[in-house]
Amino acid sequence: MLNIHRPKPGDEALYHLTSANRTIVGGRLMEFVQQKVVRMKMIGEDKGDTIYEYQLLAQQLEGTAVIHEWAMDMEILQSPLKIVLDEAGQLKDIRNLFEIREKWETSYVTHLRRKYKHMKEGLEELIAATDALLKDKPRFLQSLQGYSGWRFFFQDNFDGQPGSHQQHLLLHGFFGQVDLPLSVEATWTEEYGIGEYSCQLETKGKLDESKFDRKMFARMLKDLTGMFNVSAQLDVSMEEQLQYDKQHWLLAGELYLETKVADWYSVASAHVLERIDTARADELKKNFNVAAAPTA
């Protein structure tokens, strides 16, 4: 077994997290880059579970679509978030969803209606979808388990032996109504030095053909293009690398996933995480262009 010391209540870490997404459909390109400074703090244990508080301290957005700005507002709404991880480091529960929903209902939805008052279409649909999500905890938990920066914090499983292991990863609703099943090979390695210890997780994934609903995927592509003879041959590339210290804290990480159909349909997502000190966090916060609290 890996010789890991669990964090203690009060232990915390600061991170700089960068997420980039590029989507190509035909000749249309949509891309954005989001940066965040966040704090993860271990606040308690409960029957083998570990409870963390995630807090957004600052964020930066490079993107032009309204939906990207809306995503930043959702980041603000959901901070702080009290996360419960099970013994395998997987997301189990959110302790303060009721408080987040109360904030939404009492003030935040009014703030968003005022902020987006010039938005001619789609505002009420976004509000209704958010309202429904906040009232459905299983769906809310699932929304955090897609291929996003949250994945850095939800795979801290040190219970296995060092070496390579085959795993399965199912990304629910990755293509709207279509799930993305992946076959994953995860490799644990350990490094020792004088008074030092660290370990690393490397992951490579490919499409699990046996579990992929190609017919439904083809139907989705036909709806996008209006063509009946479109190819549904999906190529998937997935690579990840994460480094941890002996207290279970992430030191650095990179996640990359690309799904592609020929040259006309592509979704690529990349996430980079770096543990930083207070001075670096303050420096980033001064240069970021999106508040970490509601603004008019």
Image (cartoon, grey):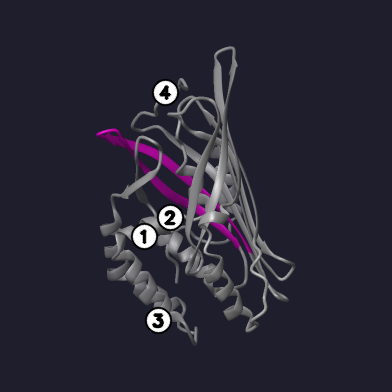
User: Which mark, residue 5?
Assistant: 4
Q: Which residues are magenta?
A: 32-61
Answer left or right for 59 relative to 31: left
Up/down of 22 relative to 190, above or below: below
Among numbered discs 4 and 1, the one appearing first in the sequence: 4
Considering only order in the chain, which callout, 3 or 4, is on the residue closer to the N terminus?
4
Q: Amino acid at mark 4?
A: His
Q: Viewer-nearest of labels 3 and 1?
A: 1
Per the image, the residue denoted by label 1 is 140
How would you rate the neighbour count of disc 3 (Cα within 10 Å): few for under 14, some for 14-19, many for 20 or more?
A: few
In the rendered view, tell whether residue 3 sits above or below residue 108. above
Disc nearest the viewer among 2 and 3: 2
Secondary structure at badge 4 equals loop
Q: Identify which amino acid the numbered label 3 is placed on.
A: Glu
Q: Are marks 1 and 2 in contact (CB under 8 Å)?
A: yes
Using the image, tell me which numbered label, if any, was put on residue 144: 2
